[in-house]
Amino acid sequence: MKKGTKVALAILGAALVWGAASCSNSSGGSNAIPPQADDGAAYSISVTGGIAKNVGGTVLTSAKVGEVVRIFATSASSQQSFDKWTSSTPGIEFDNAIMDITKFTMPARNVSIVATYKADGAVEEIFVSVPAKSFSGETAITAFESKIFIKDRSLALPAILASDHEVTHYEYTRYCKYGSNVNRVDYPRGNNYPAGHVSWYDAIVYCNLRSMAEQRTPVYKIKTASDPETWETDPSKWPDIESAEVGGSLKYSGPKENKAEWNGVVFDTGANGWRLPTEAEWEMLARGGNLTNEGQTKFSGSEHIDEVAWYYYNSGGNTTGVGKVQEVKKKKPNGLGLYDMSGNMWEWCWDWSRTINPAITTDTPWTGWATGEDRIRRGGSVHSSTDEFVTVYKNWPWKPCERHYDTEKVNGFRIVRNAP
C-alpha cells in the first residue's frame, strides 16, 4: 500500500498548475472555493497555451459571471501533444479537463488557465502527496542511524507534493541551460535522463522560473534592496545570472563562482512555488515517510541495493571508477512511490552544511542552519563505489556553485512544493 497519493502531471510545453491531489477532471478538486455572487461585472480570462472563445466563436479576454467559455489548446506540435487543462483559480470546473477543447462557466473572479503538454516519449511526471509529518524527538531514529532525526530534536514538516523522479533533461531545459558542457558516453542527455552537472544555484533558478511560468509564488528571493518587500524573485534579474538563447528563447543558469548575494538567498516557506526539499524532508521521503524505528531499510525502499539504486557496480561503469547515468524510474520505487532516492544522481537539498560536530543539534530548525560552508547533497550517485553513499542516512556537502564533472560531482535534484 502506498503511503502517498500519486498525482499524475505531465507538463511539457506549457506550464503546470495543479491544485490538489485528486482524480477529478476538475482542477479545483474537492477543495475548490465556490464562485462569488454575480455582481454584473466582467472578469478577465488568461489562457496560456490556448485560446478562449464564447459559444459564438468570438475570442474572449473577459467574460461575465455565468457565461459559458470555450477553451481551445493551440500549442501542440509534432514533438508534443496536449495533456490537460489546469487552473489555480478557485471555482473553475472544466467540462472535461483532458480534452483539448472544453468549456467552463465563468466565476466571479479573474481566471487564469494553463494548457499542459507532454513530449512524445517523455516520462510521465508524477507528484506524490505526502501529509505533514511530526517528529517529537522522544526517541531518535537509530535504525540506519539518522543524523537528522535525533533525540530531543522536535520537527514539524509541512505537507508537500514531491516529484517521483529527479528532474529530467527535458524538464530542465524548458527553462534553464547547462552552465558547462559534458560530452561523455557515461553522461547522456536524452529526455528521460536526469539533468546533471547542475549546481545548487542552477537548481534554485529552475525552481523559480518554473514557478513563475505556472503562476505560482516563487520560493526564493535575493536581497536586492533594504526593503524585503522588493527583494527579487525573478532569476532573470538576479545579479550575475547567466543567459543564452537556446531554441529561440532565453535560458538561464547560475554563476560559475561563489557569490555572496546568492549565498544569502531567502527561503519563503509560505510560498506555493517549487523548491528543493530541506534535508529533513529529503530523509523523510527517502525513508518512505516512516519516522519510527520499525520497518526501516538501508536503501530507499529496500535492503538490497540492486533493487532500488544505480551505483558504480551496476550502472555499466568503466574501470576508472566512473559509473554511467541511467534514465529515471527504471528501478523499484520506495514505499511512497519515489524513484532513485538512492543512487543515480546526488540530489541537492536546501540546507547549509556546517563543519561543527555534531552538524545538526536539537536547536536546528527544519529548514537547517541560516548559514554554513556548503550546501547539502543526498542519495549518492552512479559514481558511488561504496554502498554507504546511497543509503537513506548519508550526506555529502558541496559548494553551491559547483557543477564541474569528476567522480564526486554528479549533481542533480528533485523538486517539491507545499501542498495546497
Image (cartoon, helix red, strand yellow):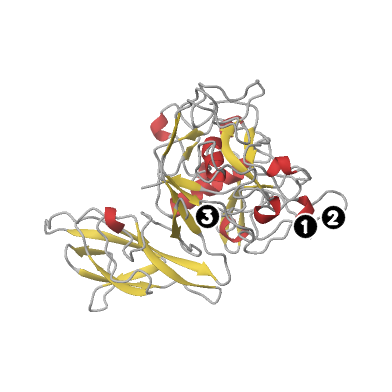
Residue 265's spot in the image, x, y percent? 52, 33
The one of 91 and 307 positioned closer to us in this rendering: 307
Which amino acid, by three-letter code, is at mark 2? Asn
Name the residue that disc number 3 marks: 337
Above or below, 41 relative to 97: above
Label 1 packing within 10 angstroms: few (<14), some (14-19), many (20+): some
Circle 2 sits in a helix, a strand or a loop, which is it? loop
Which of the two discs, 3 and 1, sits closer to the camera?
3
Residue 207's spot in the image, x, y percent? 51, 47
**Quadrant of the rendered image containing residue 57:** bottom left
The answer to whether residue 22 is left or right of residue 403 is left
Q: Earlier in the sequence, mark 3 or mark 1?
A: 1
Which mark, by number, is residue 357? Answer: none
Q: Earlier in the sequence, mark 1 or mark 2?
A: 1
Residue 46's spot in the image, x, y percent? 33, 61
Check whether the beta carbons of the residues at disc 2 and disc 3 lie within 8 A of each other: no
Q: Is residue 41 visible?
A: yes
Above or below, 262 relative to 90: above
Circle 1 sits in a helix, a strand or a loop, which is it? loop
Check whether the beta carbons of the residues at disc 1 and disc 2 lie within 8 A of each other: yes
The CA distance from mark 1 to mark 2 is 9 Å
Which of the two discs, 1 and 2, sits closer to the camera?
2
Which amino acid, by three-letter code, is at mark 3? Gly
Residue furthest to the right:
319
Name the residue that disc number 2 marks: 318
Q: Residue at (69%, 61%) from the top-left corner?
A: 189
Name the residue that disc number 1 marks: 186
